[in-house]
């Protein structure tokens, strides 16, 4: 896969139920510098269906969702501008 940026951090939330996985993702993003890219590992089903949409609604940019067979790798970017809802 060419052209993909390496994430600045990784967060393994496999086995973490909703909405806790969203909360942990958001907390981690808030600790990262603006413009940073976080890769989050999520389970199939409700986590991958709910977390990306919830992050978008909060103002975060979803750059990629990759199916890695047993889990999904979600790449989300913390915006540079301060329009993220708190």
Image: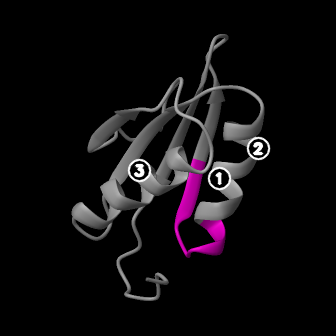
In front: mark 3 or mark 1? 3
Q: Which residue is mark 2?
A: 49
Q: Nearer the viewer, residue 48 or 6?
A: 48
Q: Position of residue 3 (x, y in %)?
A: 47, 38
Q: Position of residue 33 (x, y in %)?
A: 22, 66
In the image, taking residue 57 as reference, residue 27 lies left or right, namely left
Are the two marked residues, 1 and 2, in contact with CB atoms closer than 8 angstroms? yes
Residue range in magenta is: 56-63
In which quadrant of the rendered image does the C terminus lie? bottom left
Q: CA distance from mark 1 to mark 2?
A: 7 Å
Q: Position of residue 34 (x, y in %)?
A: 28, 71
Residue 22, placed above or below residue 83: above
In front: mark 2 or mark 3? 3
Q: Earlier in the sequence, mark 2 or mark 3?
A: 3
Q: Earlier in the sequence, mark 3 or mark 1?
A: 3
* Disc 2 element: helix
- Residue in the picture at 49% in, 53% down: 76
* Disc 1 element: helix
Residue 17, placed above or below residue 59: above
Q: Which residue is mark 3?
A: 24
* Disc 3 element: helix
How is the protein colored in the picture?
one colour
Q: Which mark is residue 52?
A: 1
In the image, taking residue 75 as reference, residue 19 lies left or right, namely right
Q: Which mark is residue 75?
A: none
- Residue in the picture at 72% in, 50% down: 50
């Amino acid at each position: 896969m060419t052209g993909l940026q390496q994430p600045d951090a990784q967060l393994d939330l496999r086995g973490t139920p909703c909405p806790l996985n969203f909360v942990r993702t958001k907390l981690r993003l808030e600790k990262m510098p603006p413009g940073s890219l976080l890769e989050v590992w999520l389970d199939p089903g409700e986590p991958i269906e709910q977390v990306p949409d919830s992050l978008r609604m909060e103002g975060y940019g979803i750059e990629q969702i990759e199916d890695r067979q047993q889990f999904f790798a979600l790449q989300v970017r913390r915006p540079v501008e301060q329009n993220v809802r708190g």
